[in-house]
Image (cartoon, rainbow, N blue to C red):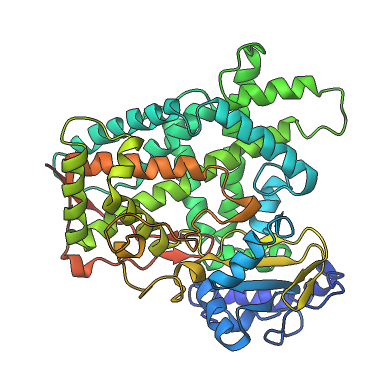
Amino acid sequence: MDLSGATPLALLLLSALSCLVLYLNGGRKKKGILPHGPAPLPLVGNLFQLDTKEMHRSLEKLSKQYGPVYTIHLGSLPCVVLCGYQAVKEALVDQADDFSGRGDFPVFYRFTQGNGIVFSNGEKWKVLRRFSLHTLKNFGMGKSSIEARIQEEAQCLVQEFRKTNGTPFNPLNLVCRAVANVICAVVFGNRFDYEDTDFLLLLDHLNENFRIMSTFWGELYNIFPRIMDLLPGPHHQIFQNFEKLRHFITERVLWHQKDLDPDAPRDFIDCFLVRMEQEKQDPLSYFNMETLVMTTHNLFFGGTETTSTTLRYSFLILMKYPEVAAKVHQEIDQVIGPNRAPCLADRTRMPYTDAVIYEIQRFISILPMGLPRAVTRDTPFRNFLLPKGTNVIPLLNSVHYDPTQFKDPTSFNPGHFLDEKNAFKNSDAFMPFAPGKRICLGAGLARMEIFLFLTTILQHFTLQPLVAPAEIDLTPQCTGLGNVPHLFQFQVLPR
């Protein structure tokens, strides 16, 4: 395991305190027939066989020895690893109900306590997901109204890019503001000005949390949460940021309560407040203030980070492969032209652009290990029996890089999503939003945003790197929860 970047004090304390794991995490063993895997050490499990700076790489490497389905021990917690398209499909798609639980994710659980859509389980998750899907649909998710909202925000982003006047800049903050404003309009009922200090601070907290959770510290916290609570390190910043996010959301919920009209809800928060009032006499209701705050956080975090990161990675990839960017520009010119705003209807007439977007998402595999799943009952799987509650790690990166599904998967090639006639072709192994019952709630919105934001930017600008294309580094700055690209600057030149 590569421990560079960890302080000697932190490692010393980790070793000294590891004996607490037996007491704090005891009693987790369950009856069943788990897949074979590397023999764990007492207390620390397979920690020293993993590079916590590239966890998914370590897990994929172990699969070459133990097969596509095996057991790894993260501390004292056994987790079943699924590697490759076939194993992930058989579990998350073919046995979708059995694998629809949310697995342990301590860095999030400390904040959410199992509330919200993403990290709840059982009946609470079913009720909240059903309510959220219905409400988001009523507020335009997947409809022309949300398309217009994205188009409007894309034009705002174009204007901000124009203000750079061809000088180098880092697109991180501008892209985050644009993407966040789309989900803000649905959840909070309004967009924020790009210079709103509260809004900018909120986005800083989101970006910092996504980065830290994708580092050594974030991964180590998920393995030894109680011990890491006692150790110094940047992981503590995650929870400070979470509290600031909680305050931001709670403040806006209180504003909504002051002028709520139950007969005319304005946004997601209003609808949730109406449901809270309807069920206030039910002590078992899942609709309460804490669940509202956590659900809103889930929507905001999920609707901002992965999409904005994908767009930033898109800029890097298109600059590294200028021949690909040139073909996209050509297709935009032929189908859309220089003046009309891109719309979703254009997508079916732009197979190459569509293939490029899919290939970008496959290539970067934004959440390389997905989010952990858990089986909802004692589950027969292949020749094993996974006890109810068993943690499952679906290696989405291994699906996107499966050579049985993609020719030369380590190369960036839009041809992976084009047939012999250069028409767009989908692939069942395309899983950036995770398949099955736990598919990302905002998958449809993300697809719309990536297409409309990217085509609008490329309609107006040529992306100019500050180094030779061959020198552009596509390896992640850090990888854990997500693959986070290196910070970069570029120029946007008017076309």
Visible residue check, residue 244: no
Where on the picture, by quarter, is residue 153? top left
Residue drawn at the location 61% of the way across and 26% of the way down: 269
Residue at the front extreme? 421
350 relative to 101 in the view: left or right: left
Residue drawn at the location 67% of the way across and 68% of the way down: 223
**Picture layout, residue 335 above or below residue 339:** below
Q: Quadrant of the C terminus?
A: top left
440 relative to 317 in the view: left or right: right
**Picture layout, residue 68 above or below residue 439:** below
**Picture layout, residue 201 above or below residue 394:** above
217 relative to 485 in the view: left or right: right
Front residue of 219/316: it is 316
Residue drawn at the location 67% of the way across and 13% of the way down: 262
**Picture layout, residue 107 above or below residue 58:** above
Residue at the left extreme? 495
Please state the horizontal and vertical placement of residue 176, each as a whole percent of the image.
Answer: 39, 42
Front residue of 279/100: it is 100
Q: Quadrant of the N terminus?
A: bottom right
Visible residue check, residue 487: yes
Please state the horizontal and vertical placement of residue 133, each as a whole percent of the image.
Answer: 61, 35
Tally of marks: 0
Please state the horizontal and vertical placement of residue 383, each as a whole percent of the image.
Answer: 75, 79
Please state the horizontal and vertical placement of residue 401, each as a whole percent of the image.
Answer: 44, 71
Front residue of 367/196: it is 367
Residue drawn at the location 17% of the way across and 63% of the way down: 467
